[in-house]
Image: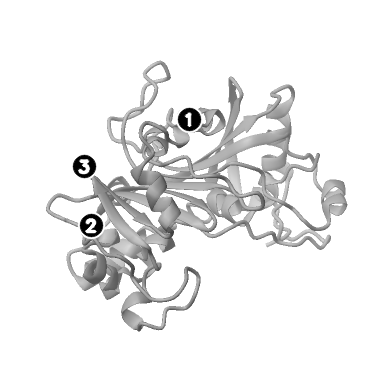
Amino acid sequence: MRRIGAALVTTIMGAAVLGGCSGGSDPNRAPKPSARTLSVEAALRELPPIRPSADQPLQVFASDFALAAELGKLPEPKDQQATSRWRQGLGGPKIAITGGEGLGLGRVETGAMRKVLGFDARDITTTASVESLPDTLTVVHLADGVSPKHVATTGAGKIGDLDPAGASDAPFPQIFGVAQRGDEVAIGKTQRALDAWKTRGQRSLADDDAFLEVAQSLDAHRIYDVVLSDRPADPRFLVEQMRDEMPATMPAFDAVGVAQGFEDGEAIEYIAYRLKDVAGAEERIRTVWEDGFSDDMVWFQELLNVEDVSTEGNVVTVKIAPRESAGTAAQMLIRGDTPFFVLE
């Protein structure tokens, strides 16, 4: 790949957690391209309003495993071989579940999570997760006939410690407990996160106007996976050098989301920014995506094609077609790459 001469430093932006859910969206907006699609707004309504961290982004992950498998024409994970093909298919190049590590997707063949919790990624239809470190909560919907075990914890020690209990706990995240309400199953990494879900009443992350506007913009498209963040990435180093090298800088935004789509057998991504001021924002955002570069000094035109940029209300949405693999823009958001810096 052709690379830029200036030295830029990669910023790491928090750990990824799997999430998702399906449901209806605002009836006043454009109709869905199909009857089956992930609803980001519905995912937000399943998650409690966990308090944001002062120095870490609040991130939301949502996925429809069943739809992703359908779009990718993946086999049902009924045996070891089919499970391996199913897992690999959800990791690109055509399909990307961006938060799979949070539910042990990468090691699903071991069956360890199913043994302890009563289910694993193979049994999940949709999932939604919110992370504001150290609090993490995941809400899942399980396939018919699957029930969770109400565990107290999956291992000894404090959250973040290596679990000395043995290999049976290693293939999936340590959790504090499991709770169930109706057809929703919640998995919490902290007592505070689990309590927030149990006592939230009608309150949810959909009460956040910025998140809600991003969700409704993305819900105008047929999607199966999304990651949201409540703030720009922190470039931390070499801000002035970045400004000098970049063809344009991102306008200020207070929420952003990247969703995965699939059209005509190819991966598509939608990036929605909720702007503080939309004046001139669309052109600046287009310039960054068309003429900019990543923080490892690769031109975006080598990684993706920009297919459309549009504005509705306070939200500018970019549609891209990744050249190499689904999830290209989502991984940029997760690690805090240049399209998510605000240098103002």
| Residue type indicated by callout 2 | Asp
- Helix, strand or loop at label 3? It is loop
Label 1–label 2 contact, CB within 8 A: no
Give residue 2's position: percent from left, percent from top: 72, 60
Q: In this view, does 243 lie to the left or right of 168?
A: right
Residue 265 in view of the camera: no
The image's colouring method is: one colour
- Residue at 21% x, 64% y: name it: 118
Residue at which label 2 appears? 123
Q: In which quarter of the image is the N terminus?
A: bottom right
Dot 3 or dot 2: first in sequence order is: 2
Give residue 320's position: percent from left, percent from top: 55, 41
- Helix, strand or loop at label 1? It is helix
Q: In this view, does 329 lie to the left or right of 85?
A: right
- Residue at 58% x, 39% y: name it: 256
Within 10 Å of disc 2 (Cα), the crowding (few <14, some 14-19, many 20+) is many
Give residue 339's position: percent from left, percent from top: 67, 45
- Residue at 12% x, 53% y: name it: 145
Q: Is residue 338 left or right of residue 185?
A: right
The answer to whether residue 338 is above or below residue 174 is above
Dot 3 or dot 1: first in sequence order is: 3
* 249 and 25: which is toward the camera: 25
| Residue type indicated by callout 1 | Asp
Q: In the drawing, what numbered circle is on residue 207?
A: 1
> Which of the two marks, 3 or 2, is nearer to us in this view?
3
